Amino acid sequence: MSDEEHHFESKADAGASKTYPQQAGTIRKNGYIVIKGRPCKVVEVSTSKTGKHGHAKCHFVAIDIFNGKKLEDIVPSSHNCDVPHVNRTDYQLIDISEDGFVSLLTETGGTKDDLRLPTDEALLAQIKDGFAEGKDLVVSVMSSMGEEQFCALKDIGPK
């Protein structure tokens, strides 16, 4: 055998999947589901009885968690659906740049500079006003399937 050491350079991530399978009949209201490749929050589920030939069907009405669009899907209840991994992370707001990007402080003390200001007008106004007043702001960022977006704002007092 060879005594050489082998060095592998990996440029890929850990291979963690963006979704996981779950049986359609077990997905409930307020859960998450992937419809047409978009992560969505389920707002309504109705199940039809089994017909003469085949399966009971689940009718899902869901809202895209990033753009708010309403999507619908009908899936046999015994089949698997993709369910997105959805994470919420809190960051402290450090700075808002001229070009619409924000600087956030992570829990480990590093900075995260790749997020744009939200498109939601109310949240955008709250962030800009709070920052202009010099308040310490903590923003919640929702991430799923490679996308990230602001979803909430907390004021932790003046600086």
Image (spheres, helix red, strand yellow):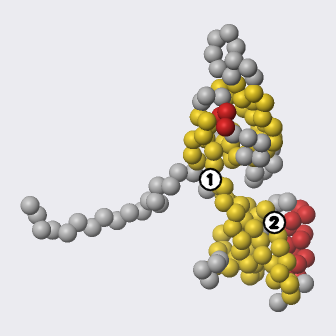
Q: Position of residue 156 (x, y in %)?
A: 83, 81
Name the side, left or right, on which 57 lies relative to 11.
Answer: right
Disc 1 residue type (three-letter): His
The tag on residue 95 is none
Q: Position of residue 12 (x, y in %)?
A: 44, 59
- Considering every residue shown, the one lying at the far left of the view is 1
Residue 80 vs 135, above or below: the answer is above
Screen quadrant of the C terminus: bottom right
* Residue on which disc 2 sits: 152
Left or right, 63 with reference to 77: right
Rendering coords of residue 122 (x, y %): 91, 63
Q: Write down the quadrant of residue 42 in the picture.
A: top right
Amino acid at pointer 2: Ala
Decide if residue 72 is in sight here: no
Looking at the picture, how far across and down is residue 50, in whole percent?
A: 69, 18
Residue 114 shows in the view:
yes
Residue 85 is marked as 1
Q: Counting other residues with Cα less than 10 Å from the Cα at mark 2, is it few (<14), some (14-19), or many (20 or more)?
A: some
